[in-house]
Image: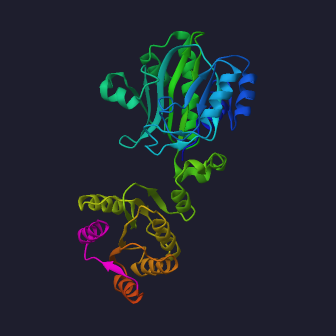
């Protein structure tokens, strides 16, 4: 789950991590009130959307007066902000973060992520802050610092010093940095984060270190432990179909293709999407109904796929195990009769109760196309959507 920058900074403040003074505004009048309350210009007006690259897209501006704040806020609230992470469709800006301006001496990059290859937590840092870290890693990999932490041991002072020394921090700044990095790690572990990134982390001319930006993502599987974090969820920033799917515990990700998929098992879903592409079509979604799906879950999944206007055909690929083929067939038939089928549907089933499932589909009276194997199914649905 993603949250906004202003929400991430609220968490930072709770853990004693320094951030610029500021508040979130939902209107021009609120933006002006906050700017006046900061007591000093310039102030920074920052669009709040779940995407990076906001500055390059025109979503971060400097204001030197109250009039500038009002003008910028009026222009930015309601604008469609396009960045390299939003795609060409962009995101509507509904809120702004109004922050104090800082006298910046140096910009750094800092992040914490889990590394599945080593089963450790990795601190990544670089003196090339304020830049796209992916580009830095590609052009100058030697500028990326990595320090690995055993999660059973936790962060130690020598981890902090290793990062700080590599960033060539002065003794005064290093002391602040060590304390801040230790707090960031504790926040990361406490809230089961999947990503924590500060770009840039700045050193001011007064030799103070401040998180100028903040990006925090959480592991969805651990959110049941963090009811307070669930309150940060912004449904306006999520795909409506993905929000709907989450109500039924369906693993659904919307894509930009034309073949809807319903599969049980993440690995099988990935393989299915690959084979669809090999057949010359494009997947419109990733939908894993899970091994223990009920007929109701299948019905809702089928309905959600059909509600995507880009879908020109559907491929159902089920290997019956815990989810029996007859349960799947029952759910598909119920959904199809409720919503109607305006696109061709290809079904490939194998496994537990497969004959009962095929019988349910055959006797339904629906125009469903069966396939003998996955390759056959992909070729059929690709031909139909063309």
Colour mode?
Answer: rainbow
Q: How many marks?
A: 0
- Front residue of this view, candidates 208 and 176: 208
Q: Quadrant of residue 363?
A: bottom left
Q: Nearer the viewer, residue 353 or 282?
A: 282
Relative horizontal placement of residue 361, taking residue 194 as reference (left or right): left
**Residue 246 location in percent, x, y?**
54, 60
Toward the viewer: 132 or 209? 132
Percent position (x, y) of residue 17?
62, 27
State which quarter of the image contains the C terminus. bottom left
Look at 65% across and 28% down and name the residue there. Answer: 71
- In the rendered view, does 54 fall on the left or right side of 116? right
User: Would residue 40 be counted in the magenta stretch?
Assistant: no
Residue at image location 50% in from the left, 24% down from the top = 200
132 w.r.t. 340: above or below: above
Residue 159, horizontal then vertical, whole percent: 47, 25
Q: Position of residue 70 (x, y in %)?
A: 68, 28
| Magenta-colored stretch includes residue 370 | yes
Q: Is residue 175 above or below residue 299?
A: above
Q: Is residue 171 above or below residue 268?
A: above
Does residue 155 appear in the picture of this structure?
no
Magenta-drawn segment: 366-386
Occupied quadrant, residue 34: top right
Residue 269 seen by the camera:
yes
Q: Residue furthest bottom?
A: 363
Determine the residue positioned at 46% across, 70% down.
302
Question: Between 62 and 357, which is closer to the camera in this rendering?
Answer: 62
Q: Residue at 45% across / 56% down in the picture?
A: 253
């Amino acid at each position: 789950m993603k949250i906004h920058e202003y929400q991430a900074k609220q968490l930072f403040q709770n853990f004693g991590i320094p951030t610029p003074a500021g508040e979130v505004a939902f209107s021009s009048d609120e933006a002006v009130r906050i700017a006046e309350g900061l007591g000093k210009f310039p102030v920074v007006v920052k669009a709040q959307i779940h995407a990076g690259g906001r500055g390059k897209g025109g979503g971060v501006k400097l204001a030197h007066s109250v009039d500038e704040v009002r003008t910028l806020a009026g222009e930015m609230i309601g604008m469609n902000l396009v960045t390299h992470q939003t795609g060409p469709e962009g995101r509507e800006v509904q809120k702004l973060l109004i922050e104090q301006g800082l006298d910046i001496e140096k910009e750094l990059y800092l992040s914490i992520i889990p590394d599945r290859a080593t089963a450790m937590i990795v601190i990544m840092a670089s003196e090339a802050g304020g830049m796209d870290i992916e580009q830095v890693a590609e052009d100058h990999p030697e500028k990326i610092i990595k320090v690995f932490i055993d999660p059973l041991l936790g962060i130690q002072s020598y981890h902090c010093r290793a990062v700080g020394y590599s960033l060539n921090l002065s003794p005064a700044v290093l002391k602040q940095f060590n304390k801040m990095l230790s707090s960031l790690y504790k926040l990361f572990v406490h809230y089961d984060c999947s990503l924590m990134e500060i770009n840039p982390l700045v050193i001011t001319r007064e030799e103070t270190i401040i998180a100028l930006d903040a990006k925090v993502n959480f592991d969805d599987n651990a959110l049941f432990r963090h009811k307070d974090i669930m309150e940060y969820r912004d449904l306006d920033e999520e795909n409506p179909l993905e929000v709907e799917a989450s109500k039924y515990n369906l693993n659904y990700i919307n894509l930009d293709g034309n073949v809807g998929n319903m599969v049980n098992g993440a690995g099988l879903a990935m393989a299915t999407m690959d084979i669809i592409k090999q057949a010359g079509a494009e997947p419109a979604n990733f939908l894993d109904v899970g091994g223990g799906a009920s007929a109701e879950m299948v019905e809702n999944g089928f309905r959600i796929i059909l509600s995507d206007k880009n879908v020109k055909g559907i491929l159902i690929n089920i290997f019956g195990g815990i989810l029996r083929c007859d349960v799947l067939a029952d759910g598909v038939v119920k959904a199809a009769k409720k919503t109607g089928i305006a696109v061709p549907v290809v079904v490939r089933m194998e496994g537990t109760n497969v004959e009962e499932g095929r019988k349910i589909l055959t006797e339904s009276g629906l125009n469903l196309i069966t396939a003998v194997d996955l390759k056959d199914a992909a070729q059929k649905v690709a031909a139909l959507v063309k």
